[in-house]
Image (tube, helix red, strand yellow):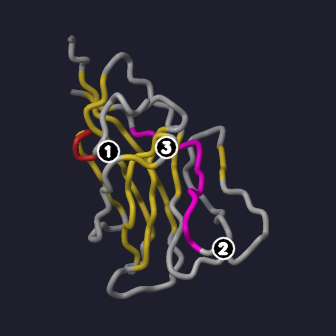
Amino acid sequence: MTHTPWKSPRKIQQLETEEIEFSKTPRTTEYTSNKPVSAVSDYFGGLVTNESSAIAFTDFGFDLDGKEVAGVEVYLFVSRLGRTQDKTIKLFAGKTVGLNQSDLQAEDKHTYSGDLKTWGVNNREIDYTAEDFGVTIDLQPHTEYPSNVTVYIRKVQVRLELVEPNPE
């Protein structure tokens, strides 16, 4: 069993939400970088009163070298300021897929990991080398002590656990 190196996304996009949009000002909701993204200093605009918008981090540039994926690890570094919790941490393959790995006790630096069953996906439904593979992240105010503090996502990285293909 081996792991790919930790990879950073090259594409970030805001996903559609059911929230009320208070501004009709056109805004960019997708960013693509020529190099792996190390930080995001822009915001996607619009007045959000109760929740954040989900963001898909994609285009990690994985090379599986003929191996199969057995597990996924997502490293998230967020300045939570003590009053922000996970809402959604899921894989993304053109759309949000699988099981939510959110952890209401997650610290500023947290790694979400598990085999494909834990993530609720299989190798037949995801192309890990595709530009649209990634992770969906949505954070929310603390469920008991809500706050409207700004949340800063400092780093998102993904690595894959690889195994030799199973001959059938």
Q: Earlier in the sequence, mark 1 or mark 2?
A: 2
Q: Report whether 112 appears left or right of 25.
A: left
77 relative to 48, above or below = above
Q: Earlier in the sequence, mark 3 or mark 1?
A: 3
Q: Are marks 1 and 2 in contact (CB under 8 Å)?
A: no
Residue nearest the viewer, comparing 163 with 50: 50
Q: In terms of secondary structure, what is the magenta stretch mainly?
A: loop
Q: Check disc 2: other Cα within 10 Å, few if <14, some if 14-19, many if 20+.
A: few
Residue 77 position, x and y percent, is 41, 60
Is label 2 in a helix, a strand or a loop?
Answer: loop
Q: Check disc 1: other Cα within 10 Å, few if <14, some if 14-19, many if 20+.
A: some
Q: Quadrant of the N terminus?
A: top left
The structure residue drawn at horizontal position 52% and vertical position 43%, both measured from the top left corner, is 58
The span from disc 1 to disc 2 (Cα, nearest Å) is 33 Å
Of badges 2 and 3, the one in the foreground is 2
Residue 117 position, x and y percent, is 22, 41
Which residue is under mark 3?
Answer: 8
* Residue type highlighted by circle 3: Ser
The structure residue drawn at horizontal position 46% and vertical position 40%, both measured from the top left corner, is 93
Residue nearest the viewer, comparing 127 with 158: 127
* Residue type highlighted by circle 2: Glu
Quadrant position of residue 146: bottom left
Disc number placed over residue 21 in the picture, else none? 2
14 relative to 115, above or below = below
Which residue is under mark 1?
Answer: 73
Residue nearest the viewer, comparing 137 with 162: 137
Of badges 1 and 2, the one in the foreground is 2
Q: Earlier in the sequence, mark 2 or mark 3?
A: 3
The span from disc 2 to disc 3 (Cα, nearest Å) is 30 Å
